[in-house]
Amino acid sequence: MLNTFRLAVEPRLSHLAAWKPFQWTVAGTFWCVFVSWGYQNLVVSGLGGTWLRPGLATGIMMAVVLAGPILGFLAFKLRELAIANKHLGVVASTDSLTACLNRGSFHEKIDEQLGEATRASRPLKGALLIIDADHFKTINDTYGHDEGDEALRIIAAQIRGQVRKGDLVGRLGGEEFGVFLPGASQENALAVAERVRRAISDMSFRPRGVRHPLSVSVGGVSFEDQLGFVELYRIADRRLYQAKNGGRNRIELTHIQAYSSSDAAPLH
């Protein structure tokens, strides 16, 4: 029913939107014609007196009367367009469920920061954390996907509440989140990861009135080298796997310099 309604209405809305520029063009033209006609009649009839005779003052007055409303309207519409474009940009880069960055935007913003550091020939110190909800399938299977969505919103809110204003938080897919901490040392990153883990464990999640514990596992890598998001994610994801394999509700964090060749071997 909804799709049928959209198919019926959207062409109509598109048609109306296409007519808007034409309508305003016609209205602006009629305004100019009306003002010119009125000026001419005042001059011919002599009602305007000497102050409406052709001259510099009259030219300025006519320009203001004709152009002022039109340019004011255009400025208003341009401001509306800028606000709409900004809103669309936010919507396009945000995960609608958790209000975090979506995966593509998260990836892009990290690579932008790393790229700026590379172009400036300076290392960008920081850390990447990968946070994954433990036993999340159990929530969906036991209580339904609506309660699973609520659990994700709770987890996302707790993650955002433990980071700084300039840090990036993204939903990477499913129940997996990423946190990028520019400028953070390994000790800083470990402290953030522990605050996130503890905050989520302390949350009261009660689907259908039944208390269900929440926990997350965290894998991460701190760095001071010129690396891209893909490489950082690969290392952090391996640490996440180790945290899951080690019993969940725990943190595994490494520094890039401690990442040895033995870590490059497949874990499974």
Image (cartoon, rainbow, N blue to C red):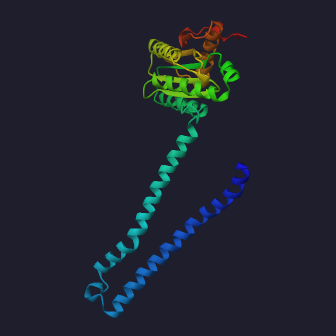
Residue furthest to the front in view is 209
Farthest left residue in view? 50
Residue 20 rendering spot, x and y as whole percentages: 56, 65
Q: How many numbered dots are placed on residues in this image?
A: 0
219 horizontally vs 79: left or right:
right
Say which of 4 and 252 sits in front: 4
Q: Can you tell which quarter of the image residue 45 is in?
A: bottom left
On the image, the x and y values in percent for residue 206 come to 57, 21
Nearest to the observer: residue 147 or residue 41: 147
Q: What residue do we see at 52% from left, 71% from top?
A: 25
Residue for point 56% across, 24% down = 178
* Residue 78, position as x, y percentages in the image: 47, 57
Q: Quadrant of the C terminus?
A: top right
Nearest the camera: 167 or 131?
131
Name above or below for residue 91 compared with residue 175: below
Say above or below: 202 vs 63. above
Q: Is residue 65 above or below residue 151?
A: below
- Counting from the top left corner in percent of width and height, residue 65 is at 36, 74
Q: Is residue 49 left or right of residue 257?
A: left
> Could you say which is closer to the camera, residue 259 or residue 58?
58
